[in-house]
Image (cartoon, helix red, strand yellow):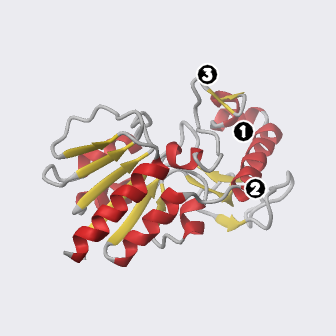
């Protein structure tokens, strides 16, 4: 079976009603990124940051996977599919995808504030101040903030290097290091880009699909499944 690597960004989650990380005004849910998504913000006002992610988690749990999420699960019938997502929600998993790599963490888990790889499932939508890990440090959302390392980036790069086909969905390729992953895909491999605003990519074998994820992804999946049957 061929390996399909799918890199997804905020555009696919936006169609489930989740706000994109950085809207046109540079804010996320009305907050400056620097006030809620950096280690410095946590040091300055941990209660504010905790509440912000609690509210985001609540929104994620209330949201539902959309047609694009479900379409990607159908690809697993005929291909080895790995989804690499920049999103911190769990919509891919809830739609049924079985291999998902979260570059920036997943908001439905908590982590130690002193040891990032010490993580726990969250019962409900809220992490309370005073809840601690086994080391005694305050629990926080299991997300990668600006200024923090992206621990899964090497794994993602290795996966991209072994792709037989690459699909990019709902991302402007503006956030690094994730934006550089396409450069690990072999140049001869076909790369589909699904987004209303196609990012500029200096690479061979690009197929541009200027659609929203809920339109473009099912369209491409149907085509790939039909090709696999021939």
Of circles 2 and 1, the one toward us is 1
Screen quadrant of the N terminus:
bottom left
Task: Quickly name the residue at label 1.
Answer: 42
Horizontal arrangement in the rendering, residue 191 relative to residue 216 (left or right): left
The reply to whether discs 2 and 3 touch (Cβ–Cβ < 8 Å) is no
Q: Residue 137 carries which label?
A: 2
The span from disc 2 to disc 1 (Cα, nearest Å) is 13 Å
Q: Residue 25 carries which label?
A: 3
Q: Say which label, 1 or 3, has the lower sequence index.
A: 3
- The local crowd at label 3, few if under 14, some if 14 to 19, many if 20 or more residues have their Cα within 10 Å, is few
Identify the residue at image location x=25%, y=50%. Answer: 191
Callout 2: helix, strand or loop? loop
Q: Could you say which quadrant of the image residue 32 lies in? A: top right
Q: Position of residue 88 (x, y in %)?
A: 59, 52
| Nearer the observer, 211 or 95 | 211
Q: Does residue 92 appear in the picture of this structure?
A: yes
Of circles 2 and 3, the one toward us is 3
Of circles 1 and 3, the one toward us is 3
Q: Position of residue 77 (x, y in %)?
A: 37, 78
Q: Does residue 144 appear in the picture of this structure?
A: no
> From what the image shows, is residue 125 above or below residue 228?
above
């Amino acid at each position: 079976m061929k390996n399909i690597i799918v890199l997804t960004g905020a555009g696919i989650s936006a169609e489930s009603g989740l706000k994109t990380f950085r809207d046109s005004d540079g804010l996320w849910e009305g907050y400056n990124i620097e006030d809620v998504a950096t280690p410095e913000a946590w040091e300055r006002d941990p209660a504010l940051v905790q509440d912000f992610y609690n509210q985001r988690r609540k929104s994620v749990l209330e949201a539902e996977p959309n047609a694009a999420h479900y379409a990607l699960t159908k690809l697993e019938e005929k291909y080895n599919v790995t989804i690499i997502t920049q999103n911190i929600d769990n919509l891919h998993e809830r739609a049924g995808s079985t291999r998902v790599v979260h570059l920036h963490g997943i908001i439905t888990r908590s982590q130690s504030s002193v040891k990032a790889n010490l993580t726990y499932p969250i019962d409900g939508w809220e992490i309370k101040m005073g809840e601690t890990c086994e080391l005694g440090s305050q629990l926080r959302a299991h997300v990668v903030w600006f200024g923090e390392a992206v621990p899964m980036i090497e794994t993602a790069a290795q996966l991209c290097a072994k792709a037989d086909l690459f699909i990019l969905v709902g991302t402007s390729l503006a956030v690094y290091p994730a934006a550089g992953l396409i450069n690990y895909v072999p140049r001869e491999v076909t790369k589909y880009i699904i987004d209303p605003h196609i990012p500029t990519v200096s690479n061979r074998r690009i197929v541009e699909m200027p659609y929203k994820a809920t339109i473009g992804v099912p369209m491409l999946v149907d085509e790939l499944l039909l090709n696999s049957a021939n």
